[in-house]
Amino acid sequence: MTAVTVSNLDAARARDTSQAMRRAAKRRRYVANGFSVVLAAVLLVWTLMPIYNIVMVSLESHNDVFSNNIWPDYPSLNGYGVVIHQGHWYLQYFWHQYGNSIYVGVAVTFLTLLISSMTSFSIGRMRLKHGWLLTNTALLTYVIPASFLAIPFYRIMQNYGLTNNLWSVIAAMVTFATPYAIFIFQNYGASIPMELDESARIDGASPWQIYYKIYLPLMAPALVAVGTYALLLAWNEYLYQFLLLSDKRTMTVPVALAQFLNSDEAPWNYMMATAIVYALPPIAAYYCFRQKMTGGLTMGGVKG
Amino acid sequence: MDATQVIETGRGKAIAGPRRRSWRGGLQGSEYTWALAFVVPYIAVFLVFVAYPVAFGLWLGHEPKLYAELWDDPVYKMTVINTILYLVIGVNVKMFLALLLSGFFMRPGWWVKALLMIYVLPWAVPALPTFISIHWMLNTDYGLVNNLLYDLFGSNGVPWLDQRWPAMGSVIAAYIWKNMPFWTVILLAGRMAIPEDIREAAKIDGATGIKSFTLITFPMLANLYLVCTLLSTIFTVGDFNTSTFVSGGGPAFSTYVLATLGIRDAFDLAHPELGVAAVMTALPLIIPLVIILMRKLRTAQVQL
């Protein structure tokens, strides 16, 4: 309503302004537009340069890599063929490692969603006594840098003989994904009316039924946002996977990718092709669920 | 956009007044058991994978002589300076540019939206491939940057990663490249949540351009900006990947940050106690930040 009135008023004023003022405004607009175009060009170059570099190197032959070209003389998809057919010493177990990454990602997503939705249901809906204590510990965990905990975490896993076991990585990732998930679920859950729980309760539903049949379906948007977050976290994380997984067969893709750097003369073209095959799924996931994730993130970051 | 809606609904609720926030008559009979059962998995994860490693870490780093040893290590001193530069320059330049760019992305037009989709790419791509790409891009002899400098200006280029300060600058630039899009999107959502009528009213009163920013937009974003900066600082202290892959900590161990030095001491030097001590020296910085952040999040609810 107000917006309409205001713009009407604005229009009336605009009619009254003199020719000269309109010309000045037009000039300002030109300057602003010109500036935007320059800024857009700078942003494009800045953003795309490292990505262009990955694509370019992945299309190069060995000789092209060690040259001064800014585009290969004979671009070829040979590098991708080598990756797909595991045709290099470093890529011996590539698809197996890819499978490991998928396994870790799926397990982390599922466990994160399960554990944190149950927790936020109990604290936010059932109002468990002293539940706020748990919310605060979750918040505190969220701000502990994961890399600081890596050393004791590794030692503990070593003591239990869980190094080179994918479940040690899954445990670590779930630990670092749940606090944020609880945070988002609590915020989102506050928008679901209690009356829904109430009526189910009067009809004799058990808490598990209310959780499973009412709470979870209504939380679907938040579940998608947090699920994507957990999946990307697990897929992209490096440090814990590097420390905990050293055997070629239990390694995940990021660890295998970094292995290329172990030798002085890294096969950069194969490495970049591997990097692209590794990066495509998360990019796709990000763009599919971008809107939902931004919503969730702002909710966490902005609303507190 | 989705994010705006979320914030809007949040505000609507706050105005709507108190609503019932728990089940009628509290938890009854077996419901209490259910509520406890729902939080057990999270408590277990917290105790085993957060509380235990934290306690173990504190125990590992409790000996004072470790800190004397650190102090005698010239690498440690360089690392502290690097970490401070990384935080002060990296975080603040990134946040300030993100604030300005979020204003740019408020402009109407399809091409601005298309640009935003490309601009968020660094955030969507996993960290490892892009940092490795940046590392190779900055290679003195064969890197894309020096090749371009030669083609465009005939210059022999800069040995980016072979000297301390250019290398540290590269690490910071890579950090900004990777993280700026995320915070731009957050601040953009914050800007979009500012009601249009306020800006319109201010416009009629004569506040346009820079005035509109300093008098309207920034005061309304200030709290969000502060929370984002604090959160980002805490995350950045624990950033392991950027320094590891862009400069590799080199040349001559001169571009380590605390997070990477801790891992080096613990694993490359096989001295986990020293590694824990190194990261513990970041606590006097992190703890006050966390306290301020918690307070901001709890009391202020970040006005929007």
Image (cartoon, rainbow, N blue to C red):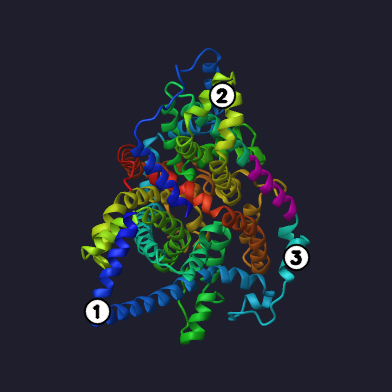
Q: Residue at x 26, y 57 (%)?
A: B216
Please state the horizontal and vertical placement of residue A190, each as a whole percent of the image: 45, 35
Please state the horizontal and vertical placement of residue B215, each as a whole percent of the image: 23, 59
* Nearer to the camera, A226 or A201: A201
> Is B73 rendered above or below residue A192?
below
Q: Residue at x 27, y 80 (%)?
A: A24
Report crowding for label 1: few under 14, some 14 to 19, many 20 or more residues within 10 A (C-alpha): few
Extreme-top residue of the structure = B29
What residue does disc 2 label?
A200
Q: Amino acid at mark 2?
A: Ala
* Nearer to the camera, B33 or B276: B33
Q: Is residue A226 left or right of residue B186?
A: right
Between the residue at mark 2 and the residue at mark 3, the CA separation in whole angstroms equals: 58 Å
Of label 2 and label 1, which has the lower sequence position?
1
Please state the horizontal and vertical placement of residue B221, each as a whole percent of the image: 31, 53
Q: Residue at x 37, y 45 (%)?
A: B282
**Which secondary structure, mark 2?**
helix
- Decide whether the magenta segment is chiefly helix, strand or loop: helix
What residue does disc 3 label?
A82
Q: Is residue B109 left or right of residue A112?
A: left
Q: Which residues are magenta?
A: A94-107
Residue A100, magenta (yes or no): yes
- Quick check: marks 3 and 1 in contact, CB under 8 Å? no
